[in-house]
Image (cartoon, rainbow, N blue to C red):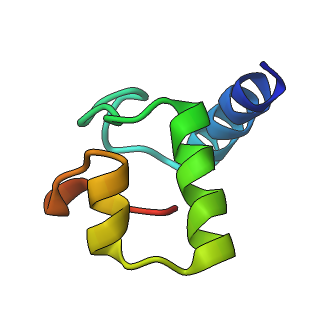
Amino acid sequence: MQIESKYALHERKRISKRKRQRDMGAGRPFKLKVKERFLMLLVYYRLYITFTLSGFLFDLDQSNRSIA
């Protein structure tokens, strides 16, 4: 899918710009795939739903609810 390929290129470019303390790919992986995160972003911007509702709709815990 076009979103996934563009996201991968942008993310690699974003991460490699600065001097890093940790390796690329280190840290907790996203619970949602790129398409699901993009859908969550679109739903949020269209409806301005609360984080509680977005957590319910996308099966997220309060600790990992993030739009960006």
Asked if residue 48 lies left or right of residue 52, the reply is right
Q: Residue at x 33, y 73 (%)?
A: 51
Q: Quadrant of residue 52?
A: bottom left
Task: Give x and y (percent) for residue 27.
Answer: 25, 36
Q: Is residue 45 visible?
A: yes
| Residue 65 at least partly seen | no
The relative height of residue 42 versus residue 39 in the rendered view (above or below) is: below
The percent coordinates of residue 67 (x first, y second) are: 48, 63
* Total numbered labels: 0
Up the image or down, 50 lies above or below 3; here it is: below
Image coords of residue 26 (percent x, y): 30, 30
> Residue furthest toward the right?
2
Horizontally, is 18 left or right of 26 in the view?
right
Q: Quadrant of residue 29?
A: top left
Residue at the image position 70 percent from the left and 26 percent from the top: 4
Measuring from the top left, give residue 50's x and y in whole percent. Answer: 38, 79
Q: Nearer the viewer, residue 60 or 57?
A: 57
Residue sitting nearer the eye, 12 or 59: 59
Q: Which residue appears at 36% of the width and 47% of the height?
A: 58
